[in-house]
């Protein structure tokens, strides 16, 4: 019998890109076997999709309730071990809640919930039940992001004295200047997207990344968000001033009206000994800056990298790793925990990241609404 | 029943990176189902590996002969439809021959054979039997390489007047200066590696790429190869002058002693209207140069790309595609042909690429041995 | 008789780099003749330096007072037409004041003054006397910065919706962690450096650049500055939130503790139609971003550039322009005005830039001191 | 009295870019005083130009013969010490000859002569008379090129095992496809341009650079040149195989039909210990590659650079140096020799570079004409 992890998926059927991404990621290290799930609200569509991607239809369920009921009725060695939630954002919370309460491990797409309160509720359940919970802040799976985290943890930057993260996209420029479009896009509707558009969608990635690589917590924020038209006040741009420690400050910039930008997510951390910079669109390069020294360019797969970084590299140096690889690394980490193997906490983001992320979004929006004042996290 | 392609694999077990790469690639578009094969000469090791990666062991065979015998005995709708050859180089030819003769479709790792004569023999069998044959010149699967090919085919460069390809690595520098090491590395032994080390391993990628993107054939070559020590004359570096047409010339440079280079493979094509440049280590950028115009930087996933390029892109612009994605695209193309679907000849390299590649290697070595003279291909 | 502009210099003698920079810049377009000045407080040292750089010593003066007295006594067609102030920062104001009052044109190194009040005083004198006043915000002299300004003025970006400027250096990291050093460096002493270190030295460049390229005024600021040790509260890092119009926001980041950074000054402007990005360390590249289009990379010297940009380019495309060239362009612009020739207001920064810059520094510091609140400019 | 070097110039008047470049370069280190020359065949035009650029007209001569006659009649301490030749290529040889024979030091634009024989003739005169002779292979003046040379000389690359130089331009594509234009451009007329267009104009820069940075001599060449139309056989593209030592090979590629390329001149040197790469269009970066180490990026002005490199840097790190700076460094080197000061042979190219360059051009053309065979240099 296969020793693969029995894996279920909610959503992600049809032409869903996120579905492809998760399935490929799950296949990368031969750790998961997709055994069923519910890809679509229509059970027939769901079963057709199962057939199309080559899995049996006997564990395709009409909804999550049926899934939980039938799977929990199976013997422990046949039951789904982990379920991925790839459904629309507003379903993340109720689905994660139901799964966690029923004892399933969960891999959840970002955002974890719509509010910080919901996030705290999930956290409480998870703490009680001890489930594995992975949140797909995919970018943390890149080998050079992992390397950044390890180098900082090892003190190679000394004391951190400045952090700077940018996440600039331009796609909302395409629609924001048309009244009808901007008021019919789900991202710009609070009921579907939550309290924030830009911060909630991408700013929170930058926030999580800063905490991931530095190992520090951001303590307070002062935000200035922006919208362009009075008839839609969802933030599509925003800068957040950050305080980590008394003398450690930083800034997080996010925008969806940075016209022409694709997915320009960058992180720079400066310490007393050195600085490190990374760019998502060229994820295989990590730049190490030191006083009076030539800049060094670290790349994946070399022996000079940490074990955590090398564990996420599959090919020899010079072969680019893409986003599929990053997601694959996260699935690999979740698999290790499910199997009870040793793992590094940097291998995948989890519940705490989700809770902190939702808190960040709400506090940043509050800072903005209260007139750009500092708010503690 | 699944409509996935029934897929077998030879070699690629254990910690094999090439095995991982092919399995992930096969999973990327939900097109293949791994049903069996022979991962290792030891049948027990092979079966253990099957279990480890989660597939049944009933179609794990002790060798290719058994595989051919048992699979051909199965009903047509259960039989393996395609077999991937991931074994050591010297086995590529005999295995491909046996599979093609038995009517199987084949995906074969590079190099296709050890000699041009063998390559011609395979080609003859394939022509007679009509099998699908994919040769994994993986780099042609990158979206921007495909875009380059399409733009040139559409005349966007005008008439081609200059081609330049570079494939520089430095890894042999690590061992070449130690007599024992350089004489015990299989890459530097003609009996295991064939007539050429550097040209055969990487120069042939550059050769195939030039023909792939230009749609032209290289007609003659003049080569100057290099080795560093008298006791091992296998080429570890070499420059090849190229002639495509009377007034179209070019140069192909390959090296394994370009110290510190990882996998620095670049292609530049210049025509009467414009030039195009691409670099494997940053595969998501395609540079378009025109007289007196700002350089343009094309990236995957945008509507301005060709259908062939977009078909190989899975995510929105700004999300890097890596080598896994490139290999995945090649598997996808092979799947289309196996299923009898429409496909673009740029989707995967095949038999002709293998034949021409082996011919290139032999003729380039001949040019060098004959004193750096022009040799027709 | 030469039709060169008669030019005097205060400071910049000996090994002064700023002296070299101004003399080379002045020579670039054959527009200036250095006729005298006061290079050093010691008249003998000053004369020796004059001899060393090949100019007569008869118009080398012991101080500015003598210079003004003797030069104003000369016939108009022999008198110095313009004087460059290259002395330490605290002398800029009194020297500029004396020169402007005596009717001389002035080229002044940055910062123009120590306070906004002084800046306003200079402006009043200049307005009354009509002198030419050039302030060497050197970076505005780069051809691609000029091109950026012209493209924005021509509406190629549409309405501006987001601005972002960064000026990161790391040099203070070298000394800030040593108590003695940080309290003996003139940059960190308010009496020598003014109200601000980081903002005053480099942040103001970023501020002036944003206004220069956009043609807009920044209306209010909210600043968060940083220092690392209680015993020296001069800012060595700071982020300033910016408001240009109701819906146009931005951020200016400056740091001298971005360890390992050299002179990493970047500007990005995003509008409804397109975005433009520029980096000082690679000043010959201007990046044009548009929705769904390949990024374009504009370079100096091409016919597609504006007249203002081309006027600042001396060599064919592909020959890099450096900081000398940028300063040379500014001197050229000042020469045009002195000669009464047509010129473009983008050719050199002047009095208004100085006044606004000092105001920015003071208001940003005030914003920080008042608890990170918005302050109107 | 000024201790500047008394400097004369032939050619370079009016709008000549090369004139501007040399005058700015000469001014950079306060070492030269332009005292006269002959800017134009028409003495009145020449005098007007002198006035325009602010120098007295009493030492403006109608031609070189008059210059030599009158200047040699002056007392030694007033006579021109060095003369720069900026006239059209075919005049370089006769003018240099006349000047060297009359005892003047010479700075000569490239190409030194039209033939190798002429170059040898100049060399013989110089050897006899002991004049200083600088040949403006400007690119050797870049600080990071100098650093490359010093690092190689210090053994930091170990034994060199591979060299690769590229000089790609695209400007001839603009005119080559029009019969009238290609047959009326002086660059494509052997009587004005000499035996070679592409090799003579730019290939020789690459050749000189390879010898400059490696300190080695290229011993033999095998060339394949190209033209596009039968009615004009001047080379506009060409690849040259190189042999330095028995086991040290390389390749030099030059083209003027690399459509869209500006001045894409690159050099890569690989040794047993490390590799170094440099690109003219980004001249402030030097890339150091080592087995299994992060690539290092060296930049000008840092203490880790050699004295030779630092001597050519005028500003702190992070301030880009351009082509003016490179030429300025060459003038500085020539000044040192004229003044009898210590200097490094890397400070400026001279007679030997000119002789070897002309020899290279002729031998490469011969290799091509003889059917792409090896020719010793």
Image: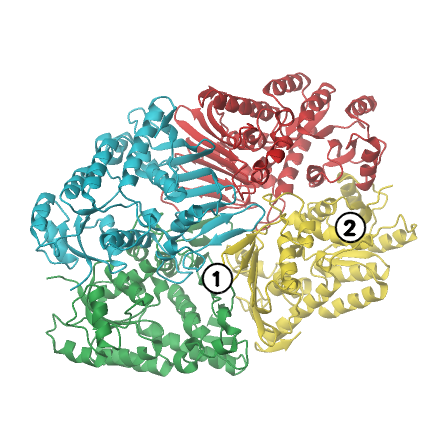
Chain colours: A red, B yellow, C cyan, D green
Q: Secondary structure at mark 2?
A: strand
Residue ID at (74%, 67%): B119
Q: Looking at the rendered structure, which numbered label has been put on residue C25?
A: none
B365 vs A225: above or below = below
B353 sits to left or right of A53: left
Horizontal and vertical percent position of residue B116: 72, 69
**Which of the chains bears the disc numbered 1?**
B
Distance from label 2 to label 1 (Cα)? 51 Å
Label 2: which residue?
B9
Horizontal and vertical percent position of residue A209: 53, 32
Q: Do marks 2 and 1 share a chain?
A: yes
| Eye-nearest disc, 2 or 1 | 1
State the image quarter where residue B208 is shown: bottom right
Q: Secondary structure at mark 1?
A: loop
Quarter of the image where the C terminus of chain D is located: bottom left
Q: In this orientation, does residue B361 appear?
A: yes
B152 vs B262: above or below = below
Q: Earlier in the sequence, mark 2 or mark 1?
A: 2
Label 1: which residue?
B292
Residue sitting nearer the eye, A366 or B193:
A366
């Amino acid at each position: 019998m296969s020793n693969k992890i029995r894996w279920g998926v909610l959503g992600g059927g049809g032409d869903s890109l996120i579905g492809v991404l998760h399935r490929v990621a799950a296949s990368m290290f031969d750790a998961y076997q997709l055994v069923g799930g519910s890809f679509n609200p229509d059970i027939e569509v769901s079963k057709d999709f199962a057939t199309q991607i080559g899995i049996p239809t006997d564990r395709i369920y009409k909804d999550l309730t049926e899934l939980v009921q039938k799977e929990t009725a199976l013997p422990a060695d046949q039951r789904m071990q982990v379920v991925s939630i790839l459904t629309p954002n507003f379903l993340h919370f109720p689905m994660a809640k139901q799964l966690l309460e029923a004892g399933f491990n969960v891999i959840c797409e970002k955002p974890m919930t719509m509010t910080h309160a919901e996030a705290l509720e999930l956290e409480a359940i998870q703490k009680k039940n001890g489930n594995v919970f992975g949140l797909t802040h995919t970018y943390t799976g890149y080998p050079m992001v992992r390397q950044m985290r390890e180098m900082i943890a090892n003190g190679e930057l000394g004391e951190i004295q400045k952090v700077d993260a940018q996440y600039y996209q331009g796609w909302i420029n395409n629609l924001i200047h048309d009244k009808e479009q901007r008021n019919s896009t789900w991202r710009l509707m609070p009921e579907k997207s939550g309290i924030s558009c830009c911060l909630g969608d991408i700013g929170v990635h930058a926030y999580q990344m800063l905490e991931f690589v530095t190992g520090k917590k951001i303590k307070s924020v002062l935000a200035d968000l922006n919208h362009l038209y009075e008839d839609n006040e969802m933030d599509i741009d925003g800068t957040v001033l950050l305080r980590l420690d008394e003398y450690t400050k930083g800034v997080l910039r996010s925008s969806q009206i940075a016209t022409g930008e694709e997915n320009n997510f960058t992180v720079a951390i400066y310490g007393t000994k050195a600085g490190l910079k990374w760019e998502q669109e060229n994820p295989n390069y990590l730049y190490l800056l030191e006083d009076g020294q030539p800049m060094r360019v670290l790349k994946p797969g070399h022996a000079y990298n940490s074990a955590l970084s090398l564990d996420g590299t599959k090919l020899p140096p010079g072969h680019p790793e893409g986003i599929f690889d990053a997601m694959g690394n996260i699935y690999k980490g979740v698999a290790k925990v499910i199997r009870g193997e040793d793992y590094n906490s940097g291998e995948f983001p989890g519940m705490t990241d989700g809770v902190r992320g939702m808190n960040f979004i709400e506090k940043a929006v509050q800072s903005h609404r209260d007139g750009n004042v500092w708010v503690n996290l």
